[in-house]
Image (cartoon, grey):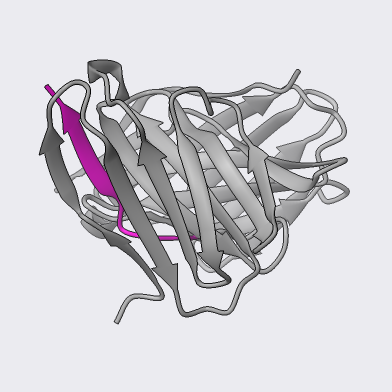
């Protein structure tokens, strides 16, 4: 079983719909992150959390929200999806600053 | 501000050496990393170098750091078809929120048989 699990792996939705991407981890790490990947742009940080009571905005948080339900769970929501949010989304965990452990990604298409 | 740049694409023949280059702008970077992303998967840490080092070698991988020019490279010796992937460099900097990573745009390495 994967240490960092994302659901769903693929989702197609329509403009204006609310979408939630979920992430769970079995690594016992306090730090969790949500990144967005667009071709040629690398990974852009959306939100991050260093523990259950800590939520921080990243570079591109507009249009997104997160919830840290437990140490092992960190979900990303798009309240009203728009087409330019079509991307590959990654959840990651870390025991410290440097090494990130990534999930397999959630591909979101907004029509 | 910080910015990490990489070329988009590199093609080599199997058995040749590959060199993937990266430039960064934040002189306060503490660690620099190379991550590998295989098709359909998330990124995995390949190797890293501390900012006070010039070189690090790990089997087929050699990382070179020129701190003066803010240039990082990853050399893969005897490149194999299984090395085909996207390679991301990343820098770690320390700020009030703790250490954070900034990623480059990724270099797609294609290895031809």
**Residue B108, position as x, y percentages in the image:** 33, 35
Q: Residue at x 49, y 57 (%)?
A: A92
Residue A9 appearing in the image: yes
Residue B79 appearing in the image: no
Q: Residue at x 18, y 21 (%)?
A: A15
Q: Residue at x 31, y 60 (%)?
A: A6
Q: Main secondary structure of the magenta part?
A: strand
> Quick check: is A104 in the magenta stretch?
yes
The residue closer to the viewer here, B47 or B93, is B93
Report the magenta residues as a range: A101-111
Location of residue A8 (image quadrant): bottom left
Relative to A95, A4 lies left or right = left
Residue B43 lies, with reference to residue B88, above or below; the image says: below
**Residue A42, position as x, y percentages in the image:** 45, 31
Relative to B101, B103 lies left or right = left
**Residue A59, position as x, y percentages in the image:** 60, 27
Q: Residue at x 41, y 36 (%)?
A: A36
> Quick check: is B55 in the magenta stretch?
no
Relative to B15, B46 lies left or right = right
């Amino acid at each position: 079983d994967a240490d960092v699990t994302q659901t769903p792996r693929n989702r197609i939705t329509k403009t204006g719909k609310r979408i939630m991407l979920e992430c769970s981890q079995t690594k016992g790490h306090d730090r969790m992150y949500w990144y967005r990947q667009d071709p040629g742009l690398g990974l852009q940080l959306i939100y991050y959390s260093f523990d259950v009571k800590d939520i921080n905005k990243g570079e591109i948080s507009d249009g997104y929200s997160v919830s840290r339900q437990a140490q092992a769970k960190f979900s990303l929501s798009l309240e009203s999806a728009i087409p330019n949010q079509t991307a590959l989304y990654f959840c990651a965990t870390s025991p410290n600053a440097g090494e990130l452990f990534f999930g397999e990604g959630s591909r979101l298409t907004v029509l | 501000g910080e910015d990490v740049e990489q070329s988009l694409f590199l093609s080599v023949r199997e058995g040749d050496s590959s060199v993937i280059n990266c430039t960064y702008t934040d002189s306060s970077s503490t660690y620099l990393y190379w991550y590998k992303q295989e098709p359909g998967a998330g990124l995995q840490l390949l190797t890293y170098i501390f900012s006070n080092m010039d070189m690090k070698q790990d089997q087929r991988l050699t990382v070179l750091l020129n701190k003066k020019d803010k240039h990082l490279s990853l050399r893969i010796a005897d490149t194999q078809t299984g090395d085909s992937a996207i390679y991301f460099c990343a820098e770690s900097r320390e700020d009030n929120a703790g250490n954070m990573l900034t990623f480059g745009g990724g270099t797609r390495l294609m290895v031809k048989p």
